[in-house]
Image: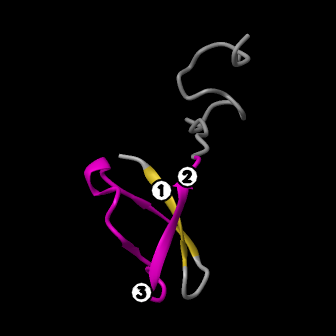
Amino acid sequence: MPLYEYRCGACSGVFEAYKRLSDEKKEETCPACGGSAQRLGISLVSAKAVDGGGKSGASSCGGAGRRQPFG
């Protein structure tokens, strides 16, 4: 289920909401003021490793060092 980013037309607030692909065309309302919101796009999510009590910066999977992406 994609996480979409919206901007309210009334209060200019920005918020995110999960939408099913089948509900993608349905109008979203602002949780702050109830105004009509315009979809900005799919929100980018930053994933961080959860520290399991080990060394700082260690991966939660317990592997050795970190690999460089695309390398």
Is tag 1's residue or tag 2's residue first in the polypeptide sequence?
1
Amino acid under disc 2 = Ser
Residues under numbered marks 1 and 2 in contact, where contact means CB atoms less than 8 Å apart: yes
| Label 3 sits on residue | 34
Mark 1 lies on a secondary structure that is strand
Relative vertical location of residue 4 with respect to residue 21 in this rendering, above or below: below
| Label 2 sits on residue | 43
Residue under the image location 55 percent in, 35 percent down: 52
Distance CA(mark 1)–CA(mark 2): 5 Å
Is tag 3's residue or tag 2's residue first in the polypeptide sequence?
3
Q: Residues within 10 Å of mark 2 (few under 14, many from 20)?
A: some
What span is in magenta?
16-44
The residue at the far front in this view is 25
> Within the magenta stretch, is there residue 39?
yes
* Residue 32 x, y percent position in the rendering: 48, 85
* Residue 34 x, y percent position in the rendering: 41, 86
Query: Does residue 58 appear left or right of residue 30 in this picture?
Result: right
Query: 68 or 51, which is in the foreground?
Result: 68
Relative vertical location of residue 43 with respect to residue 67 in this rendering, above or below: below
> Within the magenta stretch, is there residue 20?
yes
| Label 1 sits on residue | 4
Location of residue 69 by image quarter: top right
Query: Does residue 70 appear left or right of residue 43 in this picture?
Result: right
Amino acid under disc 1 = Tyr
Amino acid under disc 3 = Gly
Residue under the image location 35 percent in, 46 percent down: 1
